[in-house]
Image: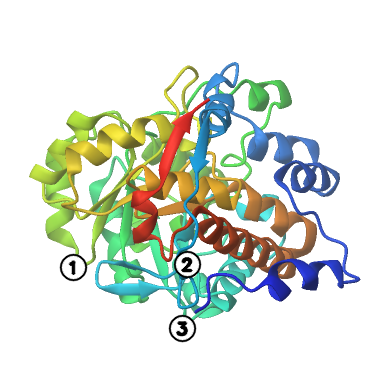
Amino acid sequence: MPIINTEDSFLQQIGSSESFPFNFAELEAAAREQIPAAGFGYIRSGAGGEGTLRNNRASFEKLSIVPRFLNDLSVANTSIELFGRKYLHPFLLAPVGMLKLAHEEGEKAAARAAALHHVPFIQSTVSSFSIEEVASAAPDSPKWFQLYWSNNENISYSMVDRAEKAGYEAIVLTVDTFMLGWREEDMRNQFSPLKEGYGKANYVTDPAFLSSLPSTDDDTIIKGILTNIFHPSLNWKHIAELKKRTKLPLLLKGILHPEDAKLAIEAGIDGLIVSNHGGRQMDGLTSSIDALPGIAKAVNGTIPILLDSGIRRGSDVVKALALGADAVLLGRPYVYGLSIGGQRGVEKVLSNFIQETSVSLALSGAADPRAARNITLVRN
């Protein structure tokens, strides 16, 4: 797959009569017009004073690429390999819950768009559509399942089993949401999409969850979800047991400290996602990209590392790859595209992001994502 095609990436855009936002600021502005204020605030905002949210971007912007030229890029490609599977691009769609906030077709539309571009889609536990519905909407595309641990462990194991049976290729356990962050935007708006039922699809279709309830009326279901989704007792023993319960690769999402990365390797974890939850869980945290080098050093190539939080441009992908990531996760940009145009909106965001990533890799002097490890970065 050619890494860069001038006609595709530039002249085609110049010659197109279609009007669609290119950069993140334009996407966000357009999405603001489409999503009701409380829902938009939930998607856009960060925890507390949003310092972590700002840090994610500021840290990327402090890094500059020093390119190399006169490399033969005529046979360059953007493909990567994770857990024995080949993917065409060095990014996946991040797990984002309750996508009906952005568009009625939610995860189904996003999964179909990802399938069209051969991009893996990571489905959230708190989806607006169930594992089985999303699998049916995009049956032949790569999908991973993100798990929020439940206080009732049998619910966690049940959902993992369902994902495995539905053909999902990996399990992503998020470890930084054992309690809800201090989210002032949602408090100002008096809005909880979980309480509104936007994220209940996987629960109301789960036999272990339903059997744990005294009744199945709406109020009882929502109370059951809220009771189960916060789990301060989660620890390494749970991780070890979950590892035994699935044949799929198991990744931990939310790792920021090198010592946790080392413990994960000792526990037999298959991969790590360096992430601060897009700045949504705690104010004042290190940015994910600043945490990445320490994690990469601790892991030393033994398992794949993915980078989440703050990815907005193709040059961000290059910087993450240069600092040791094997791939990145794209979140808010595709959600904004979903709000603007449903499936077609996500397709357009992905098409632009693929082209910009390809151009950025090539102009940095990298023939493929692995070669990006040799790219020099300097801090401004």
Find the distance from the CA under tag 1 to the CA under tag 2. Answer: 25 Å
Give x and y (percent) for residue 25: 75, 41
Is 139 displayed left or right of 189 in the figure? left
| Residue wearing tag 3 | 140
Q: Is residue 79 positioned above or below 218 on the image?
A: below
Q: Earlier in the sequence, mark 1 or mark 2?
A: 2
Please, what is the three-letter code of the amino acid marked with disc 3? Answer: Asp
Look at 78% across and 73% down and name the residue there.
12
Please, what is the three-letter code of the amino acid marked with disc 2? Answer: His
Give x and y (percent) for residue 246: 19, 63
For label 1, count other residues whose C-alpha is less than 10 Å away and answer few (under 14), some (14-19) or many (20+): few
For label 3, count other residues whose C-alpha is less than 10 Å away and answer few (under 14), some (14-19) or many (20+): few
| Residue wearing tag 2 | 89
Give x and y (percent) for residue 375: 40, 48
From this viewpoint, is residue 307 visible? no
For label 2, count other residues whose C-alpha is less than 10 Å away and answer few (under 14), some (14-19) or many (20+): many
Question: Front-most of 18 and 131?
Answer: 18
Look at 79% across and 36% down and name the residue there.
37
Write down the quadrant of residue 363 in the picture.
Answer: bottom right
| Residue wearing tag 1 | 247
Write down the quadrant of residue 347 in the picture.
Answer: bottom right
Please, what is the three-letter code of the amino acid marked with disc 1? Answer: Lys
Give x and y (percent) for residue 86: 35, 74
Q: Are marks 3 and 1 in contact (CB under 8 Å)?
A: no
Q: How is the image coloured?
A: rainbow
Look at 39% across and 64% down and name the residue there.
144
Find the distance from the CA under tag 3 to the CA under tag 2. Answer: 17 Å
Find the distance from the CA under tag 3 to the CA under tag 1. Answer: 20 Å
Q: Is residue 187 positioned above or below 229 on the image?
A: above
- Kindly report which numbered mark, 3 or 2, lies closer to the viewer in this rendering: 2
Q: Residue furthest front?
A: 70
Q: Earlier in the sequence, mark 3 or mark 2?
A: 2
